[in-house]
Image: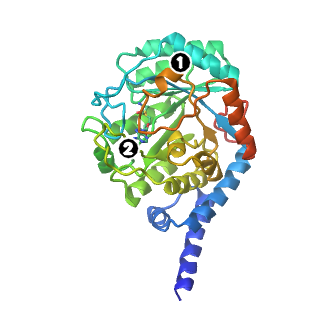
Amino acid sequence: MKDQETAVSSGKLHDLLFRLQAEHALPRAAWLELLRGHTPALQAKTAELAFSVREKFYGNKVYLRGLVEFTSYCRNNCYYCGIRAGNAKAERYRLTESEILSACSHGYELGFRTMVLQGGEDPGFDDDHLARIVGQIKKLHPDCAVTLSCGERPFEVYRRWKEAGADRYLLRHESANAEHYSKLHPAGQTLASRMECLQMLRELHYQTGAGFMVGSPFQTPETLADDLIFLSEFRPEMVGIGPFIPHCDTPFAAEHAGSVDLTLYLLSLIRLMLPKVLLPATTALATLDPDGRRKGFAAGANVIMPNLSPPEVREKYSLYNHKAHTGLESADSFNALIQSLAGLGFNAGSDRGDYPQEQ
Ligand code: SAM
């Protein structure tokens, strides 16, 4: 009798997966059923469907993005983040223009065709200076895309960076549930302002990335359903999700890390919802599980973001503890990465890896 009930409920959940694959959206009640019904068997079925969707649009290609973490100064106080302004123990650094350009040139020589400049919201890093740096990267490497991930800025600043040549922007929405968002951030940081920024980026024709941490404190199936509904409506070109990992010098030091399996399950659900999305297997995933990257690809991810920052600053960009090292100090380590991808059946794309245009 019990077996029969299990079969009926798993049949129903499979039907929801097929519906998601066909319609790319689900009503809230259906998302909740899929989230509450998460089992290893359902996760495996979802991954199987997601893997073939990724294969349909991307074949065996995965895209590499060279990550340059250019400043660890930040004016914000997100409760989860190790580089929050209130963390007096954080070691701060700010790369110079020539350090950023040489990290990008090193990446270019290795074969990267997207450079991601990420940092805290650093009031000491002039917006026009960053625009000039973006312009320099595009001038030196015209066949590269530049992605920025520099937090919330006024429309005018986003516009100047776009005009300087920036192609994409990553700004995780963190939580689409206002109450949950307010438990992750102090009063001055609001979901409304985050959403306004995402709309501005869209209006300026950036390829836009949203996303959230899996297992952040106070997250529930209900708040996750809000995240998935938001993603299905906003339809970003990129989605960044990775497990929350506590940092010892933040208010969330004693919280538990997010689950690798839930992250993998959500990656697969997002692939079914947004078939062409650029979806990284994140460093946070690789931090919690040494096999995280491979599992991320098997679940439908198609991007990795190795670190191109100068080795001496990498430890200082500490968002969470025990961050995995994916440094590419040498051509040898880059070749090892390419070979390990090949061993998994993937080829690193040699082009910019833009979001595929609608046919
Ligand atoms: N300042 C920019 C912003 O807020 O978008 C970019 C840098 S921010 C540090 C990049 C991302 O790191 C955040 O969107 C957040 O989701 C993630 N992050 C921060 N602390 C984390 C933690 N403890 N565990 C996992 N991810 C974390």
Amino acid tagged 2? Pro
Determine whether, in the image, residue 333 is placed left or right of residue 73: right
Residue drawn where x is 72% and y is 31% of the image: 335
Q: Position of residue 29 (x, y in %)?
A: 44, 66
Disc 2 or 1, which lies upstream in sequence?
1
- Colour scheme of this structure image? rainbow
Q: Position of residue 216 (x, y in %)?
A: 38, 49
Which numbered circle lies on residue 163?
Answer: 1
Q: Is 233 situated above or below 157? A: below
Determine whether, in the image, residue 118 is placed left or right of residue 252: right
Residue drawn where x is 33% and y is 40% of the image: 248
Q: In the depicted view, which residue is nearer to us: 250 or 152?
A: 250
Which numbered circle lies on residue 22?
Answer: none
Residue drawn where x is 56% and y is 51% of the image: 267
Residue 236 visible in image: no
Q: In the depicted view, which residue is nearer to us: 149 or 215?
A: 215
Quadrant for the C terminus in the image: top right
Q: In the depicted view, which residue is nearer to us: 336 or 44?
A: 336
Q: Residue furthest left?
A: 187
Determine whether, in the image, residue 240 is placed left or right of residue 178: right
- Label 1 packing within 10 angstroms: few (<14), some (14-19), many (20+): some
Residue 216 visible in image: yes
Whether label 2 touches label 1, CB < 8 Å: no
Q: Can you tell me whether the CB of the residue at mark 2 lies under 8 Å from the nearest atom of ligand 1?
A: yes
Q: Residue furthest bottom?
A: 1
Determine whether, in the image, residue 345 is placed left or right of residue 42: right
Q: Position of residue 249 (x, y in %)?
A: 31, 36
Residue drawn where x is 53% and y is 16% of the image: 100
Q: Quadrant of ligand 1?
A: top left
Amino acid tagged 1? Glu
Q: Which residue is mark 2?
A: 246
